[in-house]
Amino acid sequence: IEDQDGETVDMAALEKAADYYLSHGILSWDHKHKQNNDPESIIGEPLEVKFTDDKKTLVKGWLYQHNDKAKKVWNNIRSGAERLGSSIGGGILRKASDRIRRVVWDEVAITHKPRNDGTLGSVSMIPFSAFAKAISYSEGGTSLEEFVKALTAGSGDEDEEEEEVDDKEAKGVKKSIDDFLAEDPEAEAAMDVSPFLAQLTKAVKAIEERVDGLQKSISDKMVGVETMLKAQGKATYLQMELQKSQRTTVELIAKEDREVGGMLRMRKSRFDGEGSVNIDGPTVLEKSREWVAEKKIDILEAGLIEQRVNKNSLGTYKDDLDSKVERLIKEAS
């Protein structure tokens, strides 16, 4: 197959790529699925590939029954179209001088302008009218018993020795794409995606690490916010307690009955019928230490007495401690 630049695709290259084409290739309309990213332009699939002694490549395939473009192509064939041709598509893997030795063949396109898709070379084709009569069309849908495309392949002047070697490689050998690539280190290296996958894995790992760091940062900030809220709540509680204490102090001061010179007037006790007793604060504190030693009061009561003397509120609470102090003072006087 000779392309527009005068380079020739060896028939042996197509023979080696035939198994891959049968397992992965398609039939298309004018390569439009590649040019326009149009899946509807994929109109069928190959069934069989044969290579003739007169250097022709025959492709048998079937068209998709419910594909509108496939139906239109079929109608043109049944109408005796003579201007349609075919074009092979794929990629060049190895060249020697102006001869293409190895290809990836993935497409045969039916087209009104038989030329290649820019990768493998132009081809010629037996006119559709010459074989359209051999194709049957069943009632109610498309049924292709045989859909043959004939491509003129090779230049006819290949070295017989090279052709014989290529024929031995191609005959009766069904190869997977892995086997196909293993035979050509350059092709295998070109299609090796492991460096890309390694780079992708590294990028994904870096993203995961950044996400983990962001989550930890958010968690730390939430802990800080929680701590701040707790501290704020505690401060509010203490402020409320302080205000409560201040109100109590103000109320107590308002109830105080003071004497000039720091004298305390112990009002009439509810436990005895005698009158009030006057005594100064320092004397009460001194007496309270004696009462602790004599076990008339305990250390806690002595502390409360001192606190009330300092606040000048002794005798204003009218509780048991005030009564006890008043009684002890009377006993000591």
Image (cartoon, rainbow, N blue to C red):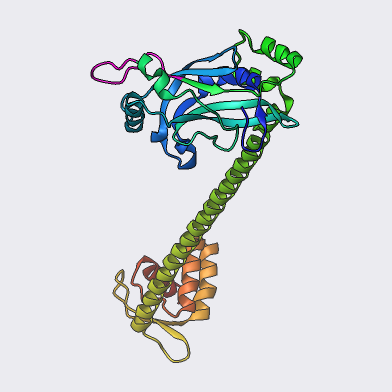
Q: Is residue 274 left or right of residue 321?
A: left
In the displayed structure, 88 sits above or below 213; it is above
Magenta extent: 136-148
Q: Is residue 156 left or right of residue 304?
A: right
In the displayed structure, 263 sits above or below 324; it is below
In the displayed structure, 167 sits above or below 122; it is above
What residue is shown at x 38% (from left), y 72% (from top)? 244
In the displayed structure, 217 sits above or below 292; it is above
The location of residue 185, given as percent across then percent down, is 73, 25
Outermost residue on the left side: it is 140
Q: Is residue 265 left or right of residue 224?
A: left
Residue 140 drawn in magenta: yes
What residue is shown at x 69% (from left), y 20% (from top)? 182
What residue is shown at x 36% (from left), y 70% (from top)? 323
**How many marks are shown on the rendered structure?**
0
Is residue 297 in view from this perspective? no
Judging depth in this view, the residue of 128 and 188 nearest the camera is 128
The location of residue 210, given as percent across then percent down, is 59, 48
Residue 22 drawn in magenta: no
What residue is shown at x 29% (from left), y 74% (from top)? 273
* Quadrant (top left/top right/bottom left/bottom right) for the N terminus: top right
The location of residue 235, given as percent across then percent down, is 47, 67
* Quadrant (top left/top right/bottom left/bottom right) for the C terminus: bottom left
Outermost residue on the top side: it is 172
The location of residue 250, given as percent across then percent down, is 38, 80
